[in-house]
Amino acid sequence: SIFDGAGRRGGQSLIHGYAGLAYKRAGDYVNSEAQYIAAIRFEGKEWEFTDPAENNASNSLRNLLFMYDAVCQGYGCGLLTSDEDVHLMKVGCVVFALLGRAKIIRVSGGSFRDMAISTVRTWKMLKPKFAKERNALNAFLDACAKPDIDSY
């Protein structure tokens, strides 16, 4: 295992999180998404999101959200137009909606305030069973638990 900058022991989750960051910085959003999802999968479901990030899962989730935001902005500006980019943008909208419902993305403030304001509009596209905070979060975590990115 390896240690992150804060002295936390990381292992697989931390390695995938750093790989996701490297892919994101290189503009390879498809592989970035896969690495962030893998990092969250390795953490399981027994973690609590913190902003600022105090654990590997929160850090990977924050970076995943920023990556989806970059894809959405790039698509909106006409810079990202491939089928993969459009797919990532759609997945990002669903993730924003679920995490907005789960109150991880808050309209009131925090790192994702601007994202959250635009996300409120996407809540209506969710099925009624995801209206509850815990159901929305579980749906996201269940998707992350899938064995590969294609199943996610």
Image (spheres, rainbow, N blue to C red):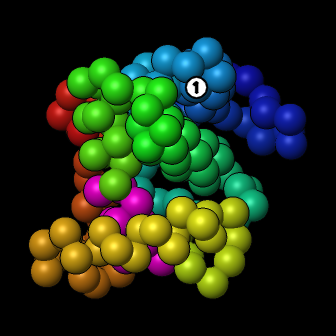
Most common secondary structure along the magenta stretch: helix
Single out the residue that lies furthest toward the right. 6
Magenta span contains residue 97: yes
Q: Position of residue 118 (x, y in %)?
A: 46, 68
| 48 left or right of 123 in image | right
**Which residue is pictured at 62% across the width and 70% down the height?**
113
In this rendered view, identify the residue nearer to me: 62 or 57.
Answer: 62
Question: Around disc 1, counting alpha carbons within 10 Å, would you say few (fewer than 14), some (14 to 19), or many (20 or more)?
Answer: many
Q: Nearer the viewer, residue 30 or 19?
A: 30
Examine the structure image and report whether residue 46 is included in the region drawn in magenta: no
Residue numbers of the magenta segment: 94-103
Task: Name the residue tied to disc 1.
Answer: 24
Left or right: where does residue 141 sit relative to residue 105?
Answer: left
- Residue 148 in which image quadrant: top left
Q: Is residue 72 left or right of residue 17?
A: left
Residue at x 75%, y 61% (from the top left corner): 52
Can you say whether 61 is above or below 15 in the image? below
Tell me the residue at 28%/46% (across/down). 90
Element on which disc 1 rests: helix
Instruction: Report x, y in % for residue 37.
Output: 42, 37
Q: Is residue 131 above or below residue 141?
A: below
User: Which residue is nearer to you in this view: 23 or 47?
Assistant: 23
Which quarter shows the C terminus? top left
In this picture, residue 131 sits left or right of residue 39: left
